[in-house]
Image (tube, grey):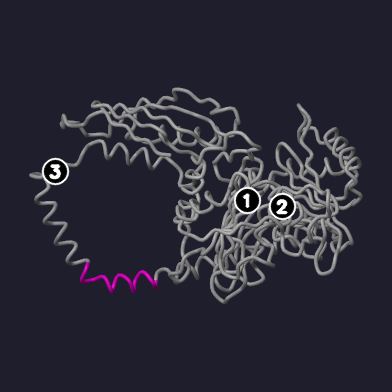
Amino acid sequence: MFGRRKMLGLAVTSRSVTAVEVVAANDGGRARCAAEFVFPDGAGLHEPGPLGKALRRFLRDKGFSASRCVIGMEAGWLTAREKVLPPGAGESARDVLSLMVEREFASDHKELVFDYALGPDSGSERSVLLVAAPQRIVAQLRAMAGAAGLTVVGITASTLALATCADGLPAHDYFVLHLFGGSAELALHAQGTLRMMRRLSVSVPPASSGGEAPSNGWISDLADQVHRIASLLPAERGEPVARELVVWDDGRPLDEARVRTLSERIGLPVKRRQHPEGLEPPEAGVPWTGAPFSAAASVALHALAGRRPAVDLLHSRLFPRKAFRFGRKATWAAVAAAAIIAVAVAWGVDWHRDTVEAAALETRLNAMAGDLTEARATIDKVTFARPWYDRRPSYLDCMRELTLAFPQEGRIWTTSLAIQEDMRVVFSGKAVSESAVLDVLDRLKANANLTDVKPLYLRQAGRSGREVAFAMSFTFAPPNRTWSSPSVKKSSLRRR
């Protein structure tokens, strides 16, 4: 399937296709053609046929000749989640992951395409990066390529391809930051495997061509998001999850001064890259602006070298498509046997995990016996003294209920919060999608301590259309609780 003399890499976003044709050269490849195809006005993947014909004319005019291609998708279309397989899963990893998918994506797993990147087997728990994409998007990409006269041999994520260019990347754990077309994506390569991929909610300014340089405000947002993600990831054996940040960009607007600022803010050394290792410099006259072309070249280099992408949504290993040649009874018997085996494996995995956790908790409890006795004595003293000395601000309980309604992921955040003396709360914020706002609204309505929950507005934020702005209000009124402290005043909270 792979290993041909030339291959076309396509890095596809919702607005453009970056194409790089790579031909075999020495131990790697050489970029023969490179160009960016911007979608015509009103065109998009919702009409893959006309879009593919326009792409075919574009490739022919630019001198492309390869007929086989590998497609790299932007992370905005994908969902990536890290899973941990217990020791002893072995060859049953696919069955265990299948059960996880059917349980976690019970309502829509049939509308998604899944694949996974499995970490090395070290005899203990194994890390797995599970990646899902809508079948509709995958079908549209294949239809567009077909209309362009191309044969698709693989579909992966552009950022994951950059994160798995083994040559030239650090031997230790590292983050990969992919800046392209005003967007930013982050991936983590740790313990020999991919562990995370996420699109960041930051608007990267376009490369300036003379005139006023972009401000540095976006660098602060970018550094804060990278630092927050890194701090939430679990460490392995007391070591940091990453020791370096590798940045793929075109050198603008991330100049050397901003690189130093980014390194200082996140506390990691930053190295910039613009060409995949093993790719010879393009010939004179071939345009090359860094990250967008590097992503397309990376997916092509993997196929040209005969390597399968770390995640291939066209050839899923989780739910492979097979042509059954058995009769109906044999098919049902095989399905029943597989289901029984999968259930038995899942039960065994759960039982083993529960046993290990119970033994660990019992050991910790025995070690904490003295501390528990001392803690109970302290609690008794505090409980006895609290009626005479209780200055807990009443609005802290209100802020706690509001905080619990927000998800741990950075899909929605607040920008302002006002709490009145009668515990009437009005807050506003932004989110990456309307569904994230509706999820928070449903959680607030389901909270028995909140009454009169109302949405005030929900609209697009800015011209880009990638974020939505919202505002809501409610009254914090837990049962059997009255507010007697006159010191509760209107307050506001702003968070970037």
Front tag of 3 and 1: 1
Examine the rendered structure and indicate whether residue 72 appears above or below residue 137.
Answer: below
Examine the rendered structure and indicate whether residue 368 appears above or below residue 415.
Answer: below
Q: Identify the amino acid type marked 3.
A: Asp
Q: Position of residue 435 (x, y in %)?
A: 55, 35
Q: Is residue 85 visible?
A: no
Give me the C-alpha separation between circle 3 and circle 1: 51 Å
CB atoms at circles 2 and 1 under 8 Å apart? yes
Residue at 60%, 48% (x, y): give it.
185
For label 3, the crowd category at 10 Å Cα-Cα, with few meaning under 14, some 14 to 19 and many 20 or more, is few
Disc 2 element:
helix
Q: Which residues are magenta?
A: 359-371
Secondary structure mostly seen in the magenta stretch: helix
Q: Which mark is residue 390?
A: 3
Q: Which mark is residue 480?
A: none
Q: Which mark is residue 178?
A: 1
Q: Position of residue 283 (x, y in %)?
A: 84, 54
Disc 3 element:
loop
Give me the C-alpha separation between circle 3 and circle 2: 59 Å
Q: Position of residue 319 (x, y in %)?
A: 72, 56
Residue highlighted by disc 2:
295
Outermost residue, front direction?
Answer: 210
